[in-house]
Amino acid sequence: MSHTIGTPANSNIPQWVYQFGGGSADGSAVDRDLLGGKGANLAEMASIGLPVPPGFTISTEVCSAFYKNEKTLPSGLQEQTEIALKRVGEIVGSQYGNKEKPLLVSVRSGARVSMPGMMDTVLNIGLNDETVEGLALWSGDRRFAYDSYRRFIQMYASVVLEVDHDYFEDILEDYKNLNGFQRDTELSAEDWADIIEQFKACVVEHHGEPFPVDVYEQLWGAIKAVFLSWQSRRADTYRMLHDISHEWGTAVNVQAMVFGNMGDSSATGVAFTRNPATGENELYGEFLVNAQGEDVVAGIRTPQPLTEAARDKSDDDSPSLEKVMPEAFAEFVAITDRLEKHYRDCQDIEFTIQDGKLWMLQTRSGKRTTGAAVKMAVDMANEGLISKEEAILRIDPRALDQLLHPTLDDSVERKVLTKGLPASPGAAAGIIVFDADEAEKQAGLGKDVLLVRIETSPEDIHGMHAATGILTARGGMTSHAAVVARGMGRPCVSGAGALKIDIKQRQMRIGAVTLSEGDLLTIDGSSGEVLMGEHPMRQAELTGDFGALMSWADSIRRMKVRANAETARETEQALKFGAEGIGLCRTEHMFFETSRIMAMREMILARDEAGRRVALEKLLPMQRSDFSELFSLMGDLPVTIRLLDPPLHEFLPHEQADIDVLSEHLGIEAADIKARVDELKEFNPMLGHRGCRLAISYPEITEMQARAIFEAALDRSSGEETVHPEIMIPLIATSNEFDRLKLVIDKTAEKVFEERGARVDYDVGTMIELPRAALMAGEIAKTAEFFSFGTNDLTQTTFGLSRDDANSILNEYTASGILEVDPFISLDQSGVGMLVDMAVDAGRLTRENMKMGICGEHGGDPASIEFFEKAQLDYISCSPFRVPVARLAAAQARIRANEAAPS
Amino acid sequence: MSHTIGTPANSNIPQWVYQFGGGSADGSAVDRDLLGGKGANLAEMASIGLPVPPGFTISTEVCSAFYKNEKTLPSGLQEQTEIALKRVGEIVGSQYGNKEKPLLVSVRSGARVSMPGMMDTVLNIGLNDETVEGLALWSGDRRFAYDSYRRFIQMYASVVLEVDHDYFEDILEDYKNLNGFQRDTELSAEDWADIIEQFKACVVEHHGEPFPVDVYEQLWGAIKAVFLSWQSRRADTYRMLHDISHEWGTAVNVQAMVFGNMGDSSATGVAFTRNPATGENELYGEFLVNAQGEDVVAGIRTPQPLTEAARDKSDDDSPSLEKVMPEAFAEFVAITDRLEKHYRDCQDIEFTIQDGKLWMLQTRSGKRTTGAAVKMAVDMANEGLISKEEAILRIDPRALDQLLHPTLDDSVERKVLTKGLPASPGAAAGIIVFDADEAEKQAGLGKDVLLVRIETSPEDIHGMHAATGILTARGGMTSHAAVVARGMGRPCVSGAGALKIDIKQRQMRIGAVTLSEGDLLTIDGSSGEVLMGEHPMRQAELTGDFGALMSWADSIRRMKVRANAETARETEQALKFGAEGIGLCRTEHMFFETSRIMAMREMILARDEAGRRVALEKLLPMQRSDFSELFSLMGDLPVTIRLLDPPLHEFLPHEQADIDVLSEHLGIEAADIKARVDELKEFNPMLGHRGCRLAISYPEITEMQARAIFEAALDRSSGEETVHPEIMIPLIATSNEFDRLKLVIDKTAEKVFEERGARVDYDVGTMIELPRAALMAGEIAKTAEFFSFGTNDLTQTTFGLSRDDANSILNEYTASGILEVDPFISLDQSGVGMLVDMAVDAGRLTRENMKMGICGEHGGDPASIEFFEKAQLDYISCSPFRVPVARLAAAQARIRANEAAPS
């Protein structure tokens, strides 16, 4: 770190102040401890030569000295600050306190980590009755100058002088009422000047002293206020709760104000270094001449495109920055290139041009659609900017859902009503709703919902989440609706100006067409089109960049990815999404079809084993053909078949009408059926007669299922190509249960093999889904040939919380912070995870290299997948639509595990 | 070991044969490996000078040599055997194969452990057409001699020659039919001689060779058959299943036959060295002159008392052994004394007097009633025969129940119907049933059942277990009914000869009184009386020998014993039984009283917190007074109070009539109540909204309960004597839940202490009753001040099996051997126990010396208590009636742990 100011080499006074801007900086991103997070970031930007509004950081050591020294500032600080301030003035060509061209500054706190309870920001410091005139003159906008001044007084008084904010709001309200103004924009410079006088009086009344007119008194007041706020009660509490040391202290950042609204040579804008919607490598953004930053994102004025290329594309007739300010534009383009290379990622940039001079206000990683994220990651890896591993780590697997969204079927003519901005890609159709609550309600009823709003705000988030798509009448590509929708992976069309919404009538109008809440509508977030009714959809293709990324992921991950599937449709879907096997075929799902449920019920209602066998004989060919189809689709990929699991009453009718139908069909008295239904009722069916317990009571069911599996496997085997089925016994708590059922399966196998004169290899394994099975895994592994963790049930019993009853409890628990996440969504790594780890270790101690996987819902959850990688499972199995998510997450988990491993 | 026969010191031939009898033996009890279990025991008896029928053991090494040497017997064996046999003859005064006074022998197998599938016994070896005449002459009973001969042929042919047993039965049946005999006893010596000829022909036909007449051929055939049976398929399987080495081999025991039915100078009997019903130190037993062993226990002839003292006591007019055979009696008494001293326990002895000479056939530890066991143990410790620790270990804690049985209330006149033998003490009343199945059925319906049988057999065991008492018409004090009932701790009156049972009519008659199945009856197993109807009962006193034993146990055990109790009655009972605290006060039990349930329901039905608080205000004084009473009864003993645990719907009415009453009482629409009842319904209430989850949702309930506890504690504290309540939070799965509720309790405490201006110390701890709590115990122990293991719930969730639904499953599992014991009765030490161990270790790692106990049903189960001792719990808590059981079991566990500890 260079020592450039205020500390002559032979002085005893330490360096308190670190300058940035003007093409250099005293610090950099690594100096977080000394400069705080914000100070380090500003130094970083300045040090790579960005035209950051200049300023300086008063280090955290000053804060420590301040508290050590009975809340007085250390000697030398004043001198160093004044030197730094002077240099800031030199860089921007103005001077602090100067009446003609006053330098205004902001003061912000900046601890190592951001912390609620600390003073945040005071803007426009340096304004008083004299300098405000200078600002008016310099900016050429008297109203702007006086508005800035009154804002400064209000902000400074409340934050630094601790005068209640409401007093000022009351004065302003009264003034407007008295003069018949509705909105702030109606007030003139003179009105603001009148109000400023009242504000000053208010400060005297409540603070006891007049508002400081001395600009240095203003500055030091703000700096001290930051240091004092370090020990505010709220900050103290926050540190305590988050284990942050009280010793760290905060830094203070003083930075020159720049203004994009100083006439037509000023402007302000936002930009992405690549297109955040598509990922194309093109500069992308918007700006407004003579405007403040808020104006661009607020959606009040429609912003102009940055580049000519973008202007051509969009049929926009407003001039581009490239055209309007070619020099600033050229500098800006060069900077964006440097920024992306420096940060090695697409940047979201805020900039201001003040009087022709470009200032970079902020740069950060740019939010993007998942499609864009994939394209960017693949492009950057191909460009050599990042490695393939980094490319993989760049994509949030949970967001892949978005890419698996359908698109509009182009073979059908589009009935386009209007066109807005293509704010978030993918097509969506649903019934129109006009507010977030209704969206949530209708979605809760299982309906696809399109949320239609004039514009969205943070209050709409839950409705956006519930909706399949979002349509707004106002707002650009970086409006709230657009940004949030992309983040959530919801298709969105924003700024569809032709759209008129009558919220009271619950209607919308586009030209001559009037639609009511509940009517069907379709949007295409990739084209911006809004279409009449429900347009047919096409499923996503998994090729191109997506395919490239997935193939990189496949080459890196260690764990296999299987799918939970029973039907041909699911199996085909799973294969299309890259499943490498079936990890869970739930045989009971095969019994619910109308044609089969009768035979199933006949079996359950049979009075004895003989009666059950008669019914099982009817089920056998159905099961065999199911398995035959499955084996045929899966070829030589592994298929794990779980034996009958749910309690029998799930198969019986409970309504009298259904019981009567069954009674007629089977020739059994309805009363007898009712009696059997009642007999099978359990207090806690989740902890009742199900899983292997059924098979122990009725081994003939297991015999039938095993026979169906072996016969199908033999049917589908020929020559060298043999099917190798994996048979899985559910709900094992003791090795004795397993051994007994394995014997039934083995005996059935021998019988079938003898009958057919042919054999297949097969494995018999078990679900580990009860705490006891996990605890006794070493014993169970003596005979079990594989484990598959059933983390749904394992979570239920480990927590003693049934999924059917847990909803309101878990909502309360996650809302109040008792649980960080719903353990049914993301694996409870400390509790349930401990059982998984124990079972893996014990199982493999007994049976080296034992095959182990997981087939609970957690198989599709990235955080859980990372855990399973660490736990050394061989595969994860999830629903077909989650297979790509799991493939990517497994690769990421592998990369992180490799990084964490001692080299 | 001395080498007395067959092995000259300079011979190379090893000692194959080990002699016993005649006052000495080559081996002793420690030579199990060499002599097998039976051989070692015989050697032990002989070596301490008992007149055991002499014999010898062919060692297990011969078996090994036999198999090593292609199934031929090793050289030297024949010589050693013949020498041994000769000596046996000398001792008994007869000679093997001698025609006048033939020595007969038995041959038995004897492995280290007894093993099914091996040849058991062949009796009367040495009989042929010549020696049978000698036996007839010598015994003076020709019929006996020929009956013995035909039995020998039948047994030898089927066991050694492998001729099917049924052939002989058929011959016998045909003979009886042909000659018009009904029973075997009608056959004369000549009939048996005829049959013997047919038997011999049968052997020729099916074995291919004649039955061996050479007595040595008979002997070697039997010996070889034993060795060959070592590798029978059944024995092989048994060894495989029980991890018994095939190398061990079996020994063969050859022993002289003795006969108690050789006329009036012969007798046979059984004896206990102390009274097995009362424990009195008096010789106790029965004998029959000129009889075989089976005759005494079969209950066909009524046996005579051994001693004059016993004869006087029992008003028996049959002469005693003391009178009839004074010399043999004197010798017998001296031997029983020596036996008890040698084995340091009461012995159950079988003896035979053959022609005036006493032979000891068997001695083993005598079964006894629990009362007798306690008296014997305490007496023996006081006599210095055993230590106090041994005395404690002698008592099966599960049997203590028997002592806690009520006795008949003597203030009420006894309506005695008849008197039988006082076979097993304690009084019992119940409805009459006439067979075991009915007993089980009625008991299953919750009824107290008296099983009334002519005599019992092993097929009746399940009915005896289900019955509260047993009454038989036939059989003595050592009959099946008497022995089994004492073992089970069931009161029993046996041999009530006046009792006539008509099983077909399901009626019994005693004199003029006829009773039907289902009528009430009372028995007094201590007096032998049978009483009309249901006689009032008196509770047991816990003083005398029982008190002494318990005080020894208390001085030895480490774990404290507490009781699970809420009411004053239970608490008083617990204190009487020696409870040292309350380990579980279930506060919800206090809400079910009629006067309280309304306020409870009002709270549940309240629409908001304010409404709940109104109802809780009503409950507060009730809870406070409950706790006040509890603290007052318990003095300075610890009291652990568990906060509300069950799901709320358990408090609501479910029948329409009850709902209507509640509706009227609370002024709430019945439909609204019904709706709330439905709303609170859960699919799996065991895994639902209960335990701490209720308290998280409704902290005001916890506030009320905590307030009631603290106010009561302050009310009951004065000066130095302060109550120190332990407050326990149920169903914790995460430390966050615990922390949140501890905060509520701590805040309430501070509020109450401030209001009262006084404080008490208190602890806040948690149940460990979910697998996750056990897994996260280290974390939870950071704030929890004690743990109490709720092993009922922990078993449910670890097994994924709800107690409400598990009955038929567990019956099936224990019957078929999938589970050894019902894990709700005796702790599953490997699975659930692993969680307990983990939680204890992790908890104490966080909080050294953390107080830990257990309050599930397992707290009263001795096997579980032994586990809890090993797990280093501080206390066990069980139902009041199990407290003495727990005290004793805890002492035993401690003694065993000390023995196991490395010294």
Image (cartoon, coloured by chain):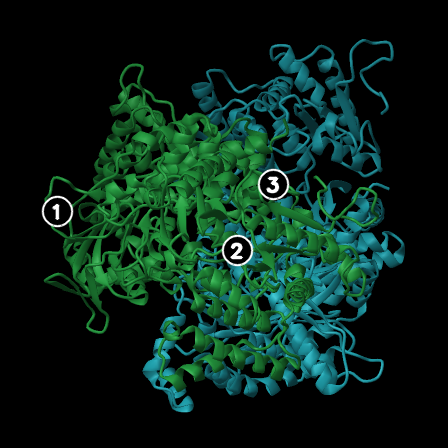
Chain colours: A green, B cyan
Labels 2, 3: front one: 3
Q: In the shown orientation, is residue A29 left or right of residue A276? A: right
Labels 3, 1: front one: 3
Q: Amino acid at mark 2?
A: Glu
Q: In the shown orientation, is residue A380 left or right of residue B491? A: left
* Callout 1 secondary element: loop
Q: Quadrant of the C terminus of chain B?
A: top right
Please name the residue shown 25% across and 30% down the image.
A628
Q: Along the polypeptide, which appears first: circle 2 or circle 3? A: 3
Q: Amino acid at mark 1?
A: Arg
Chain for mark 1? Answer: A
Callout 2: 10 Å neighbours few (<14), some, many (20+)?
few
Residue wearing tag 2: A820
Q: Is residue A779 visible?
A: no
Q: Quadrant of the N terminus of chain B?
A: top right
* Callout 3 secondary element: strand
State how far apart marks 3 and 1 are (Cα): 55 Å
The reply to the same-chain question for discs 2 and 3 is yes
The reply to the same-chain question for discs 2 and 1 is yes
Residue wearing tag 1: A414
Between A871 and B896, which is closer to the camera in this rendering?
A871
Task: Give the tally of numbered discs.
Answer: 3
Q: How far from the left and from the top, in percent, is residue B19?
A: 78, 26
Q: In the shown orientation, is residue B276 left or right of residue A614? A: right
Q: How far from the left and from the top, in percent, is residue A501?
A: 21, 66
Residue A24 — which label?
3
Between B771 and A36, which is closer to the camera in this rendering?
A36
Between B482 and B23, which is closer to the camera in this rendering?
B482
Chain for mark 3? Answer: A
* Callout 2 secondary element: loop
Callout 3: 10 Å neighbours few (<14), some, many (20+)?
many
